[in-house]
Image (tube, rainbow, N blue to C red):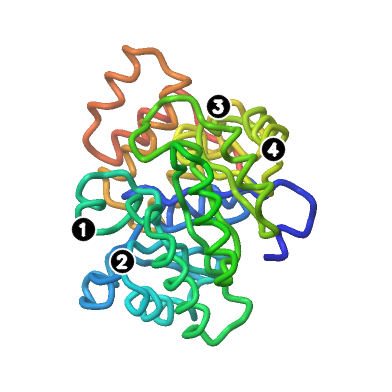
Amino acid sequence: MDLFETGKIVRVCAPMVRYSKLAFRSLVRKYDCDICFTPMIVADDFLRSGKARDSELTTNNGDRPLIIQFAARDALTLAKAACVVAPFSDGVDLNCGCPQRWAMAEGYGACLINKPQLVKDMVRQVRIQVDNPNYAVSIKIRVHRDVRKTVDLCQKAEAAGVSWITVHGRTPDERHQPVHYDAIRTIKDSLTIPVIANGDIRNLQDMESMHELTGVDGVMSARGLLANPALFAGFESTPLQCLWDWVDIALQHGTPFACFHHHLIYMLERITSQPERKIFNSLSSTSAIIDYLQNTYGSIES
């Protein structure tokens, strides 16, 4: 929470399925990212299965501040999951924004924005169960078409003790439509706790514009950071040093090849031609990728 007291815009890496894992979090932290979220973890599965816990959550001492994002649909399950992860993290976040059909059908994600009393109870239960007053409890939401409903939800969460709220400025059925800056501003003006804005943050100019238009305390980036993990450090596209940092970090962490490759595909998208992308995308081994990067871009002198 001290990060919000500095007067600077807090820079946050979004929860991203398959992508915001430990290796990638380690990379963006090198490039001025203040807070990282894990991918969304289904709290029920996490509590039920040791195997799920091992595969879903990996961290280390340098991986802080860290927020664990859970999908949950009842207060006790969320609170139990929070108690399990509290010693290894700085907060938990309740996903109230995932618009995928499977999540909504199971009672998770964006359907929770229409259950403000349940969200209030879930936040309060975590506050009661986790024996650490400095432990953060946050929610990540999408907005209603009628912003008054969103304000009501946020004020109920604030009354229950939520630390901050992240607002993705789109409704659950919007994908690539323009962000509703006015809705984010209205929500920010109705609360006394910090608000983080999410949606279309692809460079520092987007971050500054979001702050000016909405008055938020922080910004969260997902696709922007995938394409350029050095975004928050002011780079317009992925610098060569960042590519090699990713190679080093991914190899140290034993990142599976498909994940290692996919991250590089995203990073190279803005700085390569279509023929180059075709070649790179077809590479099928770590050694082939390293050879390609060395031959095409050269290595960094340490």
Find the residue positioned furthest to the right: 7
Residue denoted by label 2: 73
What distance separates the C-alpha of mark 4 from that of mark 1?
34 Å
Q: Position of residue 222 (x, y in %)?
A: 46, 41
Query: Quarter-wise, where is residue 278 in the image?
Result: top left
Are dots 1 and 2 in contact, CB under 8 Å?
yes
Amino acid type at circle 4 is: His
91 in relation to 7, above or below? below
- Label 3: how many residues lie within 10 Å, few (<14), some (14-19) or many (20+)? many
- Label 4 vs label 2: CA separation? 32 Å
Q: Residue at x 46, y 44 (%)?
A: 246
The residue labelled by disc 1 is 106
Asked if the residues shown at circle 3 and circle 2 are in contact, with their CB atoms under 8 angstroms apart, the answer is: no
Judged from the image, the secondary structure of the residue bearing numbered disc 2 is loop
Q: Residue at x 50, y 63 (%)?
A: 67
Residue with the mark numbered 3: 237
Question: Which structural element holds mark 3?
Answer: loop
**Percent of width and height locating residue 40:** 35, 57
